[in-house]
Amino acid sequence: MKLLGIDSSGLVASVAVLEDDVIIGEYTTNFKKTHSQTLLPMLDELKKMIDLDMESIDAIAVAGGPGSFTGLRIGSATAKGLGLALHVPIISVPTVEALAMNLWGAEADVCPLMDARRNQTYTGVYRFEEGQMKTIVKQCAVDVGEIIDAVNEEGRPVIFLGDGVPVFESQIAERCKVPYFFAPAHMNRQNAAALLARAKAYYQEGKMESAAEHRPDYLRLSQAERERLEQQEGKA
């Protein structure tokens, strides 16, 4: 089994290759360049470094959303184009699940926080039991106070990670009633290796789709669409 992983759901751009149980190559950057500038050159460089024969890829895993609208579109377009060219399926991995996989095996609950602006976050709550990921709160787009309340209701220690942590840190300090921690630097952002760890389970369960079928899951309307609806409601 050989899987190619692509994650461009946030500021991070990341590509990786999983062969059976080993990440044989990964290229990740977290810098303010558009993914249209970085993603394909990164993939080309990775391909050269590990002598990757693209025809040997069995499936392409991609962060399927939520996340940056532009980033998701670029990642999905890249995955679709490669999938169509190579005649391989797409594994669409929920972004928040992939982010939580950074902390696989943690005894505390895991709560990814992605900044969705307007005090909202793309988030969820996950627990690792007997070597399996258990979903406590399915990925969603909510006010940050709502997910903190959900964490409090569980009554368990929790680890927060993601680009939303620095944005919502003060609210976490004010409202979180359970012991909480923040993931360290090497675990607190998206990366294609963690995405592939989750994608492997999807692959083994047959949870795949054709490249033509794949669409990102934005979870909510874009800002432009929201503003247009607000204008229409204001005129009504």
Image (spheres, rainbow, N blue to C red):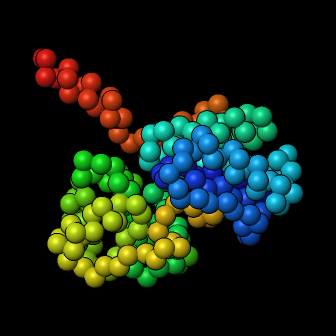
Q: Is residue 179 above or below residue 127?
A: below
Q: Is residue 107 above or below residue 44?
A: below
Percent coordinates x, y for residue 154 in the rendering: 27, 73
Does any portion of residue 161 appear in the rendered image? yes
Name the foreground residue: 44 vs 190.
44
Name the foreground residue: 154 vs 181.
181
Does any portion of residue 199 appear in the rendered image? no
The residue lying furthest to the top in this view is 236
Residue 175 figure quarter: bottom left
Left or right of 22 on screen, residue 98: left
Name the foreground residue: 88 vs 72.
72
Which quadrant of the figure contains the N terminus? bottom right
Percent coordinates x, y for residue 235 in the rendering: 13, 17
The residue located at (34%, 66%) in the rendering is 165
Q: Is residue 44 above or below residue 1?
A: above
Left or right of 60 on screen, residue 125: left
The residue located at (27%, 63%) in the rendering is 168
The residue lying furthest to the front in this view is 32
The residue located at (72%, 39%) in the rendering is 82
Q: Is residue 125 above or below residue 4?
A: below
The residue located at (62%, 60%) in the rendering is 28
Percent coordinates x, y for residue 16 in the rendering: 69, 58
Percent coordinates x, y for residue 134 in the rendering: 45, 67
* Number of numbered discs overlaid on the protein picture: 0
Which quadrant of the figure contains the C terminus? top left
Residue 215 figure quarter: top right
Left or right of 4 on screen, residue 77: left
